[in-house]
Amino acid sequence: MIKIQGKLPRDINVACSGGVDSMAVVDFLLRNHNVNILFFDHDTETSSVALDFLKKYIRTKNSEFRLDYSYGTTLTIEVGNISRIKRKDESQEEFWRNERYSFFHENDKPVVTCHHLDDCVETWIWSSLHGEGKIIPYSNQNVIRPFLLNRKAEFVNWCRSHSVPWVEDTSNEDTRYMRNFIRHEILQKALVVNPGLHKVIAKKVSADASL
């Protein structure tokens, strides 16, 4: 069952890539909210495929809403684009992240991201290897992350049980990107050392949200 931290307004922006995590959150929130999807175009072939998928999904979903008066919600999309050239001191991942958040921060309404507990664990491992373990914060200016206590499996189960479509980003398997290297090469070894790592990080996430 999907858990949520905090209260959300009726009209909400959701950062959505078309992947299983964000599609589960969009479908979950559509039951009680008007959702505006914020999609950031990374100027890649994968982004192009995902954007086409989301536009088709929105057309289909809004047609269903017009036939189902129990919903009474709407679904829209806003697209952000890369606005500058990558600096030499930025990794590709850092550049994309900086551009995404610049787009999110331009919005005057809360922006929900779909980060989950598995993301928190990966971030903690990554930052620990650089000297200080850090937790993904609940909020960053207008960006909020109310799903941090959920495992990724909860989102996968939601999509499967509610017939929610999603697109797979093949770049998620590319270990040249450090996030993927941690996920595919380091995480399982860390769990051998501490099988309860997700519970440890969940406590830290809960403590951070209560501050």
Image (cartoon, rainbow, N blue to C red):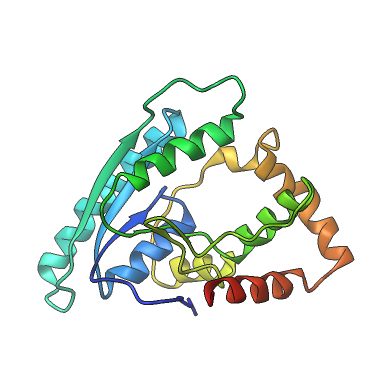
Relative to 31, 63 lies left or right: left
Seen at 85% across and 56% down, the residue is 189
Camera-side residue: 76 or 92? 92
**Image quarter (top left, top right, bottom left or bottom right) of the C terminus:** bottom right
Vertical placement of residue 70 versus 113, above or below = below
Relative to 146, 58 lies left or right: left
Total labels: the figure holds: 0
Seen at 15% across and 59% down, the residue is 63
Q: Residue furthest right?
A: 193
Seen at 83% across and 59% down, the residue is 190
Q: Which percent across, then down, holds residue 48?
A: 37, 33
Relative to 34, 27 lies left or right: right
Q: Residue furthest front?
A: 211
Camera-side residue: 19 or 162? 19
Q: Which percent across, then down, holds residue 186?
A: 80, 50
Camera-side residue: 9 or 73? 9
Seen at 42% across and 53% down, the residue is 166
Q: Quadrant of residue 13?
A: bottom left
Camera-side residue: 51 or 11? 11
Q: Which percent across, then down, holds residue 160?
A: 47, 67
Q: Which percent across, then down, holds residue 43?
A: 41, 28
Relative to 129, 99 lies left or right: left
Vertical placement of residue 133 versus 42, above or below = below
